[in-house]
Image: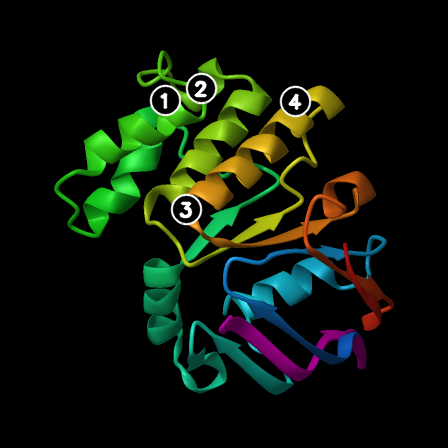
Amino acid sequence: MAKILSIQNLKKSYKSGSKDLTVLEDISFEIEEKETFAIIGPSGSGKTTLLGLCAGLDQPDSGSIELCGTFINDLNEDERALLRNQNVGFVFQDFQLIPTLTALENVAVPLELRGDKNATKIGMELLTKVGLGDRFDHYPTQLSGGEQQRVAVARAFSNRPAILFADEPTGNLDEETGQKVIDLLMELNQDAGTTLVIVTHDLELARKTQKILRLKGGRILETLKV
């Protein structure tokens, strides 16, 4: 299988007062197309920073990132945004739905912005798939946390991404609701043939993926095949 993400010798640090704080050091790994991959580690181990770098939301100090066949280090911000728009989906811990849009609009609007004439139809199909066929016209405040996350999952798959990044997707949900969202994420992922990269501190969730990368103190502790 072809690789969809290749990370080589990644380093990232931030200014903390007068000091440089190294968040990630010498990170290298590869992910293949259609693979499910978990990044785990304690708080402060650099998981979310790594996810942001992989998706081109931030730039490393050194090292290379190849995403969907493109070295994104060389791209400017607009070029990286275009690459994400065409190839990448996101699910965040805090849902990030637009409060003034209905569930259907939250899923369809990104497609409309891309000029997709079938945006509403695709949005309805995806919301039905995630069990929200009767919630099209509900606003985020009228939905439970689990329902909001399901809208976010539907939106993430709306542009048929080659790779989907999920940052603590169950972090704000109770255990039972979180389990349902994960099952859904895995099921949709399999249907769509998308590569799935999950950042989590939940070992149970990580074990549902094919490969686990364990971070500690900004370095790779181990990579496990599940």
How crowded is the residue under tag 4: few (<14 C-alpha within 10 Å), some, or many (20+)? Answer: some
Q: Position of residue 141 (x, y in %)?
A: 47, 19
In the picture as drawn, the residue positioned furthest to the left comes out as: 117
Which amino acid, by three-letter code, is at mark 1? Thr
Which amino acid, by three-letter code, is at mark 4? Thr
Q: Position of residue 134 (x, y in %)?
A: 36, 11
Q: Position of residue 217 (x, y in %)?
A: 87, 68
Q: Which mark is residue 128?
A: 1
Residue range of the region highlighted in magenta in the rendering = 1-22
Residues under labels 2 and 4: Cα distance?
Answer: 13 Å
- N-terminal of the pair, mark 4 or mark 1, is 1
- N-terminal of the pair, mark 4 or mark 3, is 4
Which residue, given by chain and number where applicable, does mark 3 sit on?
A: 192
How crowded is the residue under tag 1: few (<14 C-alpha within 10 Å), some, or many (20+)? Answer: some
Mark yes or no: residue 97 visible. Answer: no
For the residues bearing labels 2 and 4, Cβ distance under 8 angstroms:
no
Using the image, determine if residue 82 lies above or below residue 100.
below
Helix, strand or loop at label 4? It is helix
Which residue, given by chain and number where applicable, does mark 2 sit on?
A: 131
Q: Nearer the viewer, residue 30 or 22?
A: 30
Residues under labels 2 and 1: Cα distance?
Answer: 5 Å
Of circles 4 and 1, which is in front? 1
Helix, strand or loop at label 3? It is helix
Residue 75 colored in magenta in the image = no
Which quadrant of the rendered structure holds the C terminus?
Answer: bottom right
Determine the residue positioned at 76% across, 46% down.
Answer: 207
Q: Which mark is residue 177?
A: 4
Residue 5 colored in magenta in the image = yes
Give the overall secondary structure of the magenta segment: strand
